[in-house]
Image (spheres, rainbow, N blue to C red):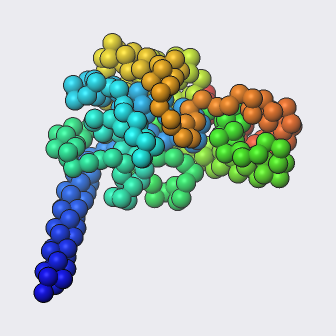
Amino acid sequence: MKSIIHSLKTTFFFIKIIKKLLVYILKKKQILESLNEYNVLVSSPSSGSTFVRLVLSSYHELNTGYGNGIPKYNSYLNKDIFALTPLIMGDYKNEFSLDKLGKENLSELKENSTKLVFFSRLPLGNANNIFDINKSKIIVLLRDPYDEILSSTVKKVKDINDKNHLIYILNEKINNYKKYVSFWNDHLKKGYKIKIIKFDEIKYEPEKSLKKILEFFNHPIKLNLLNTSINMHSIESTHERMKNIKKPNYFRFSNKEIRSKIKEKYSKYIFNHDSYIKSLKIYEKLKNL
């Protein structure tokens, strides 16, 4: 008898949890589908997206007074967590890929949905299914192909002395970059609301580039808060914040020694790669838009 009662309690407990989850998902779905326009930030790996996402999240926290703009590192998730979640990771059509949009943010989301920014990486999966491009304003982060390929390869390399391993990663990164720039080059021709933001501008003129992003998305601009947010995520501030935290796979700052070795041994291979040559031509066209 006791085992039956225990089983029933367990069953009711899980039913309650599932019911709450379904209600939450449906509410979130209704809110997202009610948006008239999506603000989308898109990047390929190593093109400045981490910095931009961190600054935007800190800025929105400071602007709303919801938090202090300083993320807390969650070792279990291996993520920087903010009090407010104005920036949603992943594919918004897939409810389970929405990153850290907890139920505590639902009311905030409903009231301030125009401040939402959806972030996606390309090329991953089917690019055409990531968001409704007809209903979107899209910021595309763009980096010089050689620097991006080197930087993203450094993050994936396991053995610098394994030539086959390195060639495999380089091929993957070069071909992915070509897919990325080709996709946006094709869509820019069709008149979609797309703005190119270059990596060099993010790196050397962060206030100017972040201001452009906020303006494009019609978000409020307060330069003092924007500069505070930028300073929070500078190399120096990030190192200071992270120095007592053991964070695995923290790749915001590439290993210069590995990068130099790849440059020394494989630059010629990159420059002569057919997809690299084609990518460079498209990049030159896009960066001047």
Q: Nearer the viewer, residue 115 or 247?
A: 247
x 76%, y 46%: residue: 159
How many numbered callouts?
Answer: 0
Q: Is residue 14 left or right of residue 274?
A: left
x 46%, y 46%: residue: 120
Instruction: Return the x and y of residue 254 as percentages of the image width and height.
Output: 64, 31
Instruction: Return the x and y of residue 258 as percentages of the image width and height.
Output: 75, 34
Q: Is residue 16 left or right of residue 281?
A: left
Q: Is residue 59 above or below residue 102?
A: above
Q: Is residue 248 visible?
A: yes
Tell me which corner region of the image, top left, top right, bottom left or bottom right, holds residue 17. Answer: bottom left
Instruction: Return the x and y of residue 238 as percentages of the image width and height.
Output: 48, 24
User: Residue lying farthest front?
Assistant: 2
Q: Is residue 90 above or below residue 277?
A: below
Q: Is residue 245 left or right of residue 259?
A: left
Instruction: Return the x and y of residue 279 as percentages of the image width and height.
Output: 71, 42
* Quadrant in the picture for the C terminus: top right
User: Residue lying farthest bottom?
Assistant: 1
Tell me which corner region of the image, top left, top right, bottom left or bottom right, holds residue 271. Answer: top right
